[in-house]
Amino acid sequence: MSERILTVDAIPDKLIPQFLKQAKKIDEFWFDMFLLCVTFGLRNIECRELKFSQINLKEKRITLSNTKADKTKLTRKVNQHLDKQWNIKGRQWLREHMSDLNASLIIRLAISLDELGFIAEEYQLGLAYEKAKQIYYNKEKPQIYQYFKRTLPSHSRQIDFSSFKAIEKMLSRRLKKHKGRTYLFPRDELIRNKLITNKDKPLSRQSVYNVIRKISHSLKNKLKNIKLGLHSCRKSAVQKVATLMNDVFAASIWIGHGHGKGNLSMTERYLNRSKHRFQEINLKLSKACHYDHCVKSTKFSHC
């Protein structure tokens, strides 16, 4: 098992109340933010940049849009379309610049953009080819980006909080407190410096990470072999739903993987893979498996 997989773990379910308690000790601001994250599995950036315009108290719904998944999908679509267009334009460019009577035939043999690049290198056109490609991408990208942006759905996930009275109460309180503002968790709520002019901005990623580190340190005796980070609350929520429903695919759809259609391969990364979990498995396995005893006693029914 690689260290990359084990980098960030979920908060163990039994420790979530203590995690939130420590957050509240630091400031109620952090309790509110982490409560929202761990309940609905919001990404850190989704919570930090959550706007009041995305919250409908009357319908008791949070609408997530322009999320990390949306941006990733949009970028992928734009790049795929640019590559497809350059597959045509790049061949035309090579035919115009290659000093070879068989240029058309040679170019026709290329089946990928990488192979077109290799042909350009072979004819000492590598730098000029890459420059022409970059110029073309820079020119076409803005309009292609806008086209695909219009084709994406207006939201990627809707969260119904009608059954979560504590969340509803917290959102109502914050809406009243920051009426007329943009963000649910504005940074100036924590920064008391009156000289700051542009206060209505979201928190930085580093600010949240520092608080998680502080809470982790205060719970270090209970978090042995468990590494918390920015994604821990989201992982905790997914594991909670998967356990409650006994259905990983249901958790996948609920969290919005696969653009709301579910993606098991993505959701499986959120399951418990901590060192603590592996140690727990090994301990239970060592107590349950006594095959040598079974062979000696010839009583296999208890193995």
Image (cartoon, helix red, strand yellow):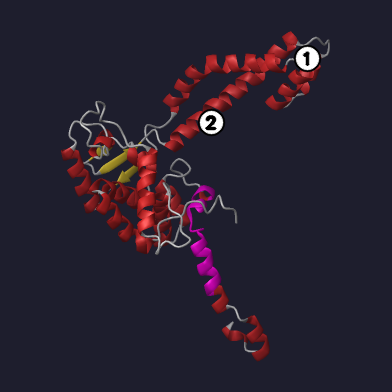
Q: What range is drawn magenta here? A: 265-284
- Name the main secondary structure of what is drawn in magenta: helix
Q: Nearer the viewer, residue 50 or 265?
A: 50
Compute the Cα span from label 2 to label 1.
Answer: 30 Å
Q: Image quadrant for the C terminus?
A: bottom right
Sort mark 1 into few (<14), some (14-19) or many (20+) by Cα contacts within 10 Å.
some
The kind of residue tagged 1 is Ser
The kind of residue tagged 2 is Arg
Q: Image quadrant for the N terminus?
A: bottom right
55 over 1 or under it: above or below? above
- Residue at which label 2 appears: 76
Residue 212: x and y in percent read 37, 50
Q: Is residue 241 visible?
A: yes
Residue 17 magenta: no
Is residue 103 left or right of 20 when viewed as pictured? right
Is residue 12 left or right of 34 when viewed as pictured? right
- Residue at which label 1 appears: 104
Q: What SS does tag 2 mark?
A: helix
Residue 16: x and y in percent read 34, 59
* Tag count: 2
20 over 175 or under it: above or below? below
Q: What SS does tag 1 mark?
A: helix
264 over 220 or under it: above or below? above
Q: Nearer the viewer, residue 1 or 57?
A: 1
Is residue 159 left or right of 189 when viewed as pictured? right
Q: Residue lying farthest left?
A: 176
Q: Is residue 112 visible?
A: no
Question: Considering only order in the chain, which callout, 1 or 2, is on the residue closer to the N terminus?
Answer: 2
Residue 140: x and y in percent read 53, 16
226 over 265 or under it: above or below? below
